Amino acid sequence: MTESMTDTHERPTKYIFVTGGVVSSLGKGIAAASIGRLLKLRGLRVTLQKFDPYINVDPGTLSPFQHGEVFVTDDGAETDLDLGHYERFIDQSLSQANNITTGRIYQTVISKERRGDYLGSTVQVIPHITDEIKSAIRRLSADNDVVITEIGGTVGDIESLPFLEAIRQFRADVGHENAIFIHLTLVPYITAAGELKTKPTQHSVRDLMQIGIQPQVLILRTEHPLSEEIRKKIALFTNVELEGVIESRDVETIYEVPLSLKAQRLDDVILQHLGIDLPQPDLTEWTAMVNRVKKPSSVTARIAVVGKYTALVDSYKSIQESLIHGGIANDARVEIEWLSSEHFSEDEGVGTLESFDGLLIPGGFGPRGVEGMLAAIRWARENEMPFFGICLGLQTAVIEFARNVCGLEESHSSEFSEGSSDPVICLLDSQLQVTTKGGTMRLGAYSCALEEGTRAREVYDAEQVSERHRHRFEVNNEYRELLTQNGMTLSGLSPDGGLVEMIELSDHPWFIAAQFHPELKSRPTRPHPLFASFIEAAAQYAQKKATAPVEEPVGV
């Protein structure tokens, strides 16, 4: 018997566990987020959670080349990039409780043991580690109808075993009618044989079943359509009902995934297993958004992202998605090229910017590639190309302006040159006594007051906004007056006036930089105003170039 929507206040919280097999990087996060979107559209209160099996307490000290971007939540948690997907798909803010690592679990258990909480017991993986994992799941239960938990890693990895054992126990604890397992695997195509192979999926499910987990749903990543025969074969050998064998082929945009899963009635299958009967979702708005991504009717804006970690696009995943959101807002196609700042200098590389319509300098740490960023910013400033600086992008914009407009040729950031005679960027006062790296930056949501009459105020259409931060350095207040006297507008300040949050140039068509990370709050159905405005400016720049007579740009 299923429950109707009117029974939601009495219904126990339901749980969905998403695991992965065969190989990594199959898209568990996108699959989990897509399921979350579909269930939310059916009227359920949904949250998502990521369990990461590494021993780091959080990804804050990991290299972007190894782990991709660090996604920061409002409450200042440094989390996995999948939380960005979760927030963008279900359109709600998450917290520290939504990303749990092995390191955090063990840290909590060891702290309890040191306090004597275990009353003389021998502390073991089972039950103490698994109990703590289960507690992390339950913490999200109170305010949600459904908790979707993604288990990082691949089934068979030794690191994931405590999480898998915990979710096995958890389903037994809450009742099989209140929890289901979804397993994402690969069905590879062997070109030489001209065949799709099901054995990897069979073996992956067998590994799960040896742990005591029988999946109710399989999501099969494949480059080729799965025949009915193959689906029946997989269903037979994995003990999964045929309607629970779901095909997941590559799509043009990740935002198409919920539509693909809905076409195969995945949400219906899930709700049937969980004993819930709800009206069908209204996908009109989401479908329209997807169509705007795939078939925009306006111009194309080519954006150069000049950064330190461009060899791995996932290092800037939220920026990539936010630029796409900006295109959605303007019904424009956005083409992004990821360029290493190490390939830029005053004499080389900057000329390539002529073929673009906008420049974005993202965040980063350390001196590598900074001089290239300065050269690119100067080119954009002098050639009136739309420029958007984020975090380090603001700091480098200030350094470039100080050097080439204010005449402080030796100006720099104290992060990169401790002996600089003009440190226009300096360490935050709150960071002076900090000696540890993990979780110690200025993190999370802080307010920013927008100055009247500025472009920032116009773009946001608000006097004050809240944005997420991740930094240790700031604009040196001793140089504020010099910067403003030479034409830089400090358009956003902390409410107490102590920190510069945004800068812009009033004599430039579109030149804005922010110390915070606006990309962390952009959503496909609610593009961030700064990205929407930036892409609008880039599209206008592209149209202007298309109709203007050819001239030699400055600085080539």
Image: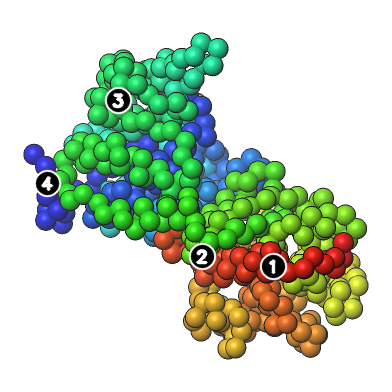
List the residue tagged with mark 3: 214
- Badge 2 or badge 4: first in the primary sequence: 4
> Hey, what amino acid is under mark 4?
Glu
Work out how far the residue at label 3 is from the one at label 1, CA to CA, in angstroms. Answer: 62 Å
- Badge 1 or badge 4: first in the primary sequence: 4
> Hey, what amino acid is under mark 3?
Gln
- Badge 3 or badge 2: first in the primary sequence: 3
**Residue at 34% of width from left, 58% of height from top?**
285
Q: Residue furthest left?
A: 1
Work out how far the residue at label 1 is from the one at label 4, CA to CA, in angstroms. Answer: 61 Å
Tell me the SS state at disc 2: helix
Q: Nearer the viewer, mark 2 or mark 4?
A: 2
Tell me the SS state at disc 4: loop
Q: Is residue 50 above or below residue 378?
A: above
List the residue tagged with mark 1: 547
Q: Nearer the viewer, mark 3 or mark 1?
A: 1
List the residue tagged with mark 4: 3
What crowding class fits label 3: few (fewer than 14 Cα within 10 Å), some (14-19), or many (20 or more)?
A: many
- Badge 4 or badge 3: first in the primary sequence: 4
List the residue tagged with mark 2: 330
Q: Position of residue 363 (x, y in %)?
A: 67, 59
Work out how far the residue at label 3 is from the one at label 2, CA to CA, in angstroms. Answer: 46 Å
Work out how far the residue at label 4 is from the one at label 3, CA to CA, in angstroms. Answer: 24 Å
Quarter placement of the N terminus: top left
Q: Are marks 3 and 1 in contact (CB under 8 Å)?
A: no
